[in-house]
Amino acid sequence: MDYIVDSIKRLPDFVVPYHPECIKLNQNESPFDIPVSIKQKICEKLVEKKWNQYPQKDPVGLIKLLSDYTNFSSQGIVVGNGSIELIQAIYTTLCDINDSIVMISPGYTVFPREASIRNLKYKEIPLKEDYSFDVDAIIEASQNAKVVIFANPNNPTGTAISLSEIERIAKSFNGILVIDEAYYEF
């Protein structure tokens, strides 16, 4: 008996291409390893922690640091174990089977993949010829959307959307605007 749902069976393998001739930055990685002295300090901190209990639910200290760094309220910050976990949580928490999601294309491949796993409807809005965001098309498509989601700067093009354009999108629909800024510092 096959218990795996069809939406999972239809998915191709998730593969990140490897090009040894390039400096790899596409997964927010560094081409340089962390110095041994920092690794040792991390290990010392791990030894001090209790391993027989779950950690606190919310890493309050990290959230405070992120709030200070971004000058954004700590009440609006959610942290997770990488963007895929957060995207899964967003879709699971906010989206029902008949809800629609708007995203851009080309964009972060995890956005449509995770929507497909959950059998969610999604619409991909193509970037303009110069790889800029088609804000008018995003606004038009989002009128009945539950979520609009994109990376800024975009993955894989590296193009960014301005704050004024983000504000235009946010004010144009009644859903949730999710902006993945994993590559913001780039």
Image (spheres, rainbow, N blue to C red):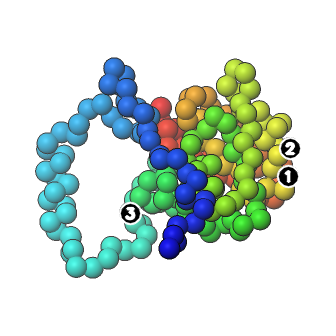
Between 36 and 108, the one lying in front of the other is 108
Q: Quadrant of residue 167?
A: top right
Question: x, y percentage for residue 183?
Answer: 49, 38
Alpha carbon separation for disc pair 1 and 3: 38 Å
x 57%, y 66%: residue: 5
* Image mark for residue 143: 1
Badge 2 element: helix
On the question of residue 74 being in view, the answer is: no
User: Which residue is the extreme one toward the front?
Assistant: 1
Question: x, y percentage for residue 18?
Answer: 38, 31
Q: Residues within 10 Å of mark 2 (few under 14, many from 20)?
A: few
x 83%, y 36%: residue: 136
Q: Residues within 10 Å of mark 1 (few under 14, many from 20)?
A: some
Relative side of 53 to 22, left or right: left
Residue identified by numbered label 2: 140
N-term mark: 1 or 3: 3
x 67%, y 36%: residue: 105
* Image mark for residue 61: 3
- Please report contact status of discs 1 and 2: CB closer than 8 Å, yes or no: yes
On the question of residue 183 being in view, the answer is: yes
Badge 3 element: helix
Relative side of 78 to 115, left or right: left
Q: Nearer the viewer, mark 1 or mark 3?
A: 1
Q: Amino acid at mark 1?
A: Gln
